[in-house]
Amino acid sequence: MSEVSQSSAQAVPTNPDSLEVAPGTSHERLEGWVPQLAKEDDIRQALEKAFDYRGDITITRKDGSRLEGYVFDRRTGGSLSDSFVRVIPSNARERLSIPYSDIAALKFSDRDPAAGKSFEAWVRKYWEKRAAGEKNIQITPDALE
């Protein structure tokens, strides 16, 4: 084995747990947030956060109409009129596309339905139940409202 391959082999961690740990994502607390949409970049950044948000967003259009729903996709183009946010309205199953240029305001819902429901939180609850003597502990999803 050459010196180069020996030194690179020594740099590889031997602990398998260290290989499976990746840095996590820090999540902002966006519940109830009403972003300022003064500039084009403000609109783009707010809609990126809306896409990552797990709750509903209320979109106020420039014509004054409002739409509350879940942002499931966005398509960014060169201009605001070429960029679209795709929403499933809270009161329907249709999918709507709204140009960024039509958006006057955004409001994030006051509640993120997935907040506190990370895998780490589930593991903590599991060990608490096990320590309390519970048997047949299973992974079960929380009820949807």
Image (cartoon, rainbow, N blue to C red):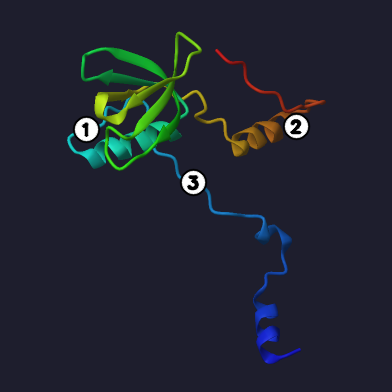
The amino acid type found where label 3 is placed reads: Thr
Q: Nearer the viewer, residue 58 or 84?
A: 84
In the rendered image of this protein, does residue 21 appear above or below residue 113? Answer: below
Instruction: Mark 3 vs mark 2: give the one in front.
Output: 3
- Quadrant of the rendered structure where residue 30 is? top left
Q: Nearer the viewer, residue 144 or 105?
A: 105
- Quadrant of the rendered structure where residue 58 is? top left
Instruction: Please state the horizontal and vertical placement of residue 112, each as a whole percent of the image.
Output: 45, 25
Q: Is residue 29 visible?
A: no
Label 1: how many Cα within 10 Å (few below 14, some 14–19, many 20+): some
Rendered-image quadrant of the C terminus? top right
Element at label 1:
loop
Numbered mark located on residue 25 in the image? 3
Q: Is residue 144 visible?
A: yes
**Which badge, 1 or 3, comes first in the chain's sequence?**
3
Element at label 3:
loop
Left or right: 50, with 105 as reference point:
right
Q: Are marks 3 and 2 in contact (CB under 8 Å)?
A: no
The amino acid type found where label 2 is placed reads: Arg
